[in-house]
Image (cartoon, grey):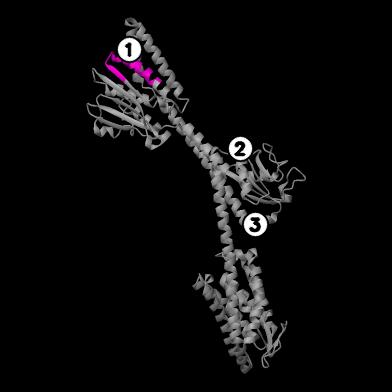
Amino acid sequence: MFELLLLMLERLGLIVMLAFIATRMRFFRVMVKSTRLTRKQTWTAILFFGAFGIIGTYSGVTFQAESLVLQRITFGIQEDAAIANFRVIGVVLAGLFGGYKVGLSAGLIAGVHRMLLGGFTAFSCGIATIIAGLFAAFYRSKNPNAVNRPLSIFLLGALAETVQMGLIALLANPTAAAISLVQTIGLPMIVANGIGCTLFLLIIQSVTKEEQKAGALQAQKSLRIAEQTLAHFKHGLSSHSAKEVCDILYKELNACAIAMTNQDMILAHIGVAADHHKTNMSIQTKLTAEVIAKKQMIIAGDDEIHCKEPNCPLGAAVIAPLIIRAEVVGTLKFYFHSKKEITELETEMLSGLTNLLSSQLELAEADRAYQLAKEAEINALQAQISPHFLFNTLNTVISLIRIEPMKARTMLHSLAQFLRQNVSATTTKLHSLAEELHHIKAYLSIEEVRFEGRLTVQYKIDERFLHVSIPPLTLQPLVENAMKHGFKNKRSDCVLIISVQEQGEDVVLSVQDNGAGFDPDKLKKLGNELPATDSGTGIGLYNSNKRLQMMYGPEASLAFSAEPGRGTLVRFRIPKLARKDREHHEHEEQTDSHAGR
C-alpha cells in the first residue's frame, strides 16, 4: 500500500505539469474568472476536462487484482486487472469551475472511456466518475467560495474517490476481489486524488495572483502616466502637448513607437519609423482614418497597417480614438514589432490610457470654456458705467460752460480720461494698482467739482505696492458707492480715505467714508445679493465682489463694517504677487521639477 502511494505521488507530477500548462491557456483563465460561460467556452471546457480525465486514467498504475503485482500503463485492462488513477481530478474541477453541464459532460466522457478500457471495475468506476462531476457542481452551488479554500478542495477530491471505492465494493464482481482491491488501493487513491485536486487549485490561485499583481502594476503605471501627462494637456491637443505626452508614454510603455494625430495630420511620433512618420505630415496609414471614422480601437498586424512607406518596420499597432464630447479629435497609436507582443492585459491598459487621456482633453476643453465664460462675465461687469454719474456730470458741465468755462473744460477732460480707461479696462484682466488709482483720481476730480469744496480725499498709499496687479475697475465702484450713497445727504465735511497697506503675504485695500453708513440688516446683503432695482445701492458692490471672488477666490471677498450715521469701511485683500506672475512662477517650478526627475 505504501509503495503504491509513493508511485502514485510520483505519477502525480505529470498531472501537476499538465495543470500548470492548462493555466497558461487563455480559455482556461477566462473560464476561471467568468461567472457564466458562453456556449463556446462551455464546449471547450467539456472537451478539456474530459480529456484531462482520460489522461488521469492513463497516468495511473495498472496491476493484477489477485496477485497485486504492479504493471506499466496499458491501453487495455484485463478482466482481472484494475487501475489506480487520477481521473477524478479533472472531473471534480470540471464541476467546480463549469457547473452541472460541464461536470456531467466531462464525467460522461471520462467515465465512458473508463468503461471501454475494460476490467472487472469498469462499470463501477465509470458510474463513480459521472457522480463525481455532478457532486462537485452541487458542492460549488452550495459553497460559492469553495474554490478559494484548499482544504475544502482536498476533502472534496478525497470524498469523490471514497465514493468510487464504495461503488467498486458494492458493484464489482467478484465481490471478494473487489473488497481486496479497495483495501489495497483505497487509501493511496483517496490521498493522492485529494492532493492532486489541491495542487491544481493552488496553481490556479497562483496564476490569479500573478494576474492581479500585473494588473496592480499596470494600474500604478497608468496613474503615474496620468499624473505626468495632466499638465501637458492643460491647453488642449497640439503638436507641443502631443510630443510631450508621447515622450512620457514611450518611456513608460514597452511599445517600439508612440504616435498621436489629430483628424488630419501627425502631431508627434516617437520611436521606430520616425524618419517617415514626421510631425505635421498627413496621416500615413489607412487604419488611422478607419479608427477616426468608426470611433473604435483597432488592433492590427503588419498586413493591416497599410503604411504608405513600403519598408516600414512597424509590425503591429493598437490605434485608439481620442474623443471629446462624443467627437473624435485625434488618435493615440501604440506600435509594436509583432502582434504577439500585444497581450490582453496590454490591450486593456492601452484602452484605459486612451480613455484617461481623452478625459484629460475633455476636462481641459471644459476648463477653457469656463475661463472664456468667466472672462466674458468679468468684461461685462467691468463695462458697466452708472448712467446717473454720466448724466450728472454732463449736467454739471452744461451749467459751468457759461459761468466757469475752464472748470467745464477740466471736467470734460477728466470725463474723457475716465471713459477711456473704462473702455480699455474691458480688454485686460489685470492692470497695476497705479493705473487703478489714476482712474479713481480722474473720477474724483469730477466729483470734487460737483461737491464744491465739501469733499476731502485722503490717500494712504504704500508706494511699494503700486506695481501690484489688480482687476480693472475694482476700487472705483467702492469709491462711487461712498460718493453716491454715503455722502448723499451730507452737506459738509465729507471725508474719503483710500488706503493701500501691507498685511502678511497680501495687500489690503480699503475705502472709508464718514457718511450715512448702513443698517446692520442691509449690511449683510451688500456685495452678495443684487438689489431689487437698478437705482438701489449695491450693483457696483456686487459686481466688484463677484469679480474678486472669480479672480482670487472667496478669501478676497469684500468685507464691510458700518454704523448708521458714522460712515462705512470696505476692505478686501489681494496677493502681493500678480496672478500672471504666479502662473509664470508655477510653470517654472513645474519645469524645474520635471528636469529634476
On residue 347, which mark appears? none
> In the rendered structure, which amino acid carries the disc numbered 2?
His
**Residue closest to the eye, 143 or 591:** 591
Asked if residue 505 is among those painted magenta in the image, a careful observer would answer: no
Question: Where residue 266 sits in the image (x, y, percent)?
Answer: 66, 39
> Does residue 593 appear anywhere in the picture?
yes
Q: Residue at x 60, y 84 (%)?
A: 188
**Magenta segment, principal secondary structure?**
helix
The residue positioned farthest toward the top in the image shown: 402
CA distance for labels 3 and 2: 30 Å
> In the rendered structure, which amino acid carries the disc numbered 1?
Thr
Q: Residue at x 56, y 40 (%)?
A: 232
> In terms of secondary structure, where does tag 2 sit?
helix
Q: Which of the marked residues, 1 or 2, is nearer the chain's N terminus? A: 2
Reply above or below: 333 against 89: above
Question: Where residue 60 sits in the image (x, y, percent)?
Answer: 67, 81
> In the rendered structure, which amino acid carries the disc numbered 3?
Thr
CA distance for labels 1 and 2: 58 Å
Which region is colored magenta? 438-457
Q: Which residue is mark 3?
A: 343
Q: Which residue is mark 1?
A: 396
Q: Which of the marked residues, 3 or 1, is nearer the chain's N terminus? A: 3
